[in-house]
Amino acid sequence: MRTWRAAIVLALVAGSISAPSPSGAQTIVVKAARLIDGRGGPPLEPAMVRITGERIAEVAATMAVPAGATVIDLGSATLLPGLIDLHTHLTDRDDVHWESALTTTTPPEAALWGARNARLTLMAGFTTCRDMGPTWPYVDVELRKAIDAGAVPGPRLIVAGNYVSSTGGAGDARQFSIYLDVPLVRNLADGPEEIVKAVRTNFKYGADFIKILVTGAVLSKGITPGAQQYADAEIQAAVTEANRWGRPVAAHAHGAEGIKAAIRAGVRTIDHGSYLDDEAVAMLKQNRKTFYVPTLALASYIQESPHVPESEKARGRVVNEIAMGGFRRALAANLPIGLATDAPVMPHGLNAREIEYRVSLGEPAMHAIVAATSVNAEILGMQDRIGSVTAGKLADLIAVHANPLTTIGVLRDVRFVMKGGTVFRDDLSSRKETTR
Ligand SMILES: [Zn+2]
């Protein structure tokens, strides 16, 4: 643990050395033994990637190094695209249940811990995250702005702002005595009219997409995970209004009826998707508009957490068994499957455990890597910028010291991170030289 923290500090120092040049025109050539480019084809061995400014200019087994280029030689390492997590809560702490956070923490605390968690997540190789909503509304918007401005290191963020929940449902931030108010959190919307208002309010204050809670949740006192909590017309109202703004809706959905209602309404993602049944699989198979985004590795963390009440652990045990079946069903049907963690339900920075866990459930390693890179980029509608190591894309590159196709767990030990052409971590290169 101590060594690991020291490595983070070193990485931060390394990051400050290679701050982006104002012109953005610096050329870097990264060399490694192998490249898994995120598209699912055979690895390129050896591999060289030329980066100009924030973008990838050329990818080849070998190439001439232009004069003035900085060469980063990662030796026997394997290069991959920056990983993408479609379901994080970066401003939430690992050690505080979100419901007690409402009565014992403050938005500034969430912002500071958000900066800490964003750095941990970036250093773990996740260069893009879709953040599914803070406890304190819009702290994620500020975190995204601070990261974009270069004030704090972190993944490129796509944020939910203030997730939309029904009264008494999962995500109801007012599950207290009726005499106790939590004045600063207004996330409840009932009926199409209130939902439309909530969608507009989110976009007004900087959200990139809408998260709605379509069914109950595991970590909630509200309606049970299997039950649909928003009526079909309410889900449709969210999607219609968000789409009017050109933005998608992500649906937290465990129960099968909620999953199917959300697919019919045209949401972009079914998050968790635990009770995914054959009918839902068939519906998803018919188009590539709605994607299943399970969160599976978190189950053991819920059971071990001292902060989760027994009633919610019991919900977790029931849902987890069913969720494994849903995942295997999706895998057997060859559905594209997004990759997500729900961190901090599993600790921030351990996000790659989800990839490892899915491989342990029978998913081929390459399939899981493609999920975490190009499939996730497509789900975000960002496939023109991220998700693969190909010319023209943003230079989001990571490296590990072994081949993840044979040792998937090595993805938990990312030792090189570049985001948009800037090196944030490099514990691998033996030498950096500038050609003259
Ligand atoms: Zn979540």
Image: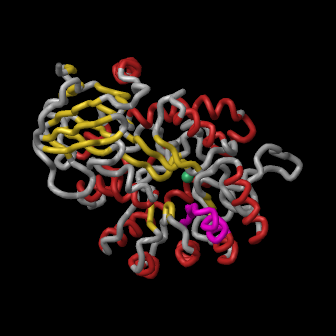
Q: Position of residue 3 (x, y in %)?
A: 34, 20
Q: Is residue 237 left or right of residue 418?
A: right
Q: Quadrant of the N terminus?
A: top left
Q: Is residue 89 left or right of residue 331?
A: right
Marks counted in the figure total 0
For image coordinates 53% across by 48% down, the residue present is: 158
Q: Is residue 29 left or right of residue 306?
A: left
> Residue 420 occupies which quadrant of the picture?
top left
For image coordinates 18% across by 57% down, the residue present is: 41
For image coordinates 59% across by 41% down, the residue present is: 307
> In this view of the protein, which residue sits in the foreground, 309 or 335?
335
In this picture, which residue range is highlighted in magenta?
Answer: 238-254
> Residue 235 occupies which quadrant of the picture?
bottom right
Q: Is residue 303 left or right of residue 172?
A: left
The vertical placement of 427 against 127, above or below, is above
243 within the magenta span: yes
259 within the magenta span: no
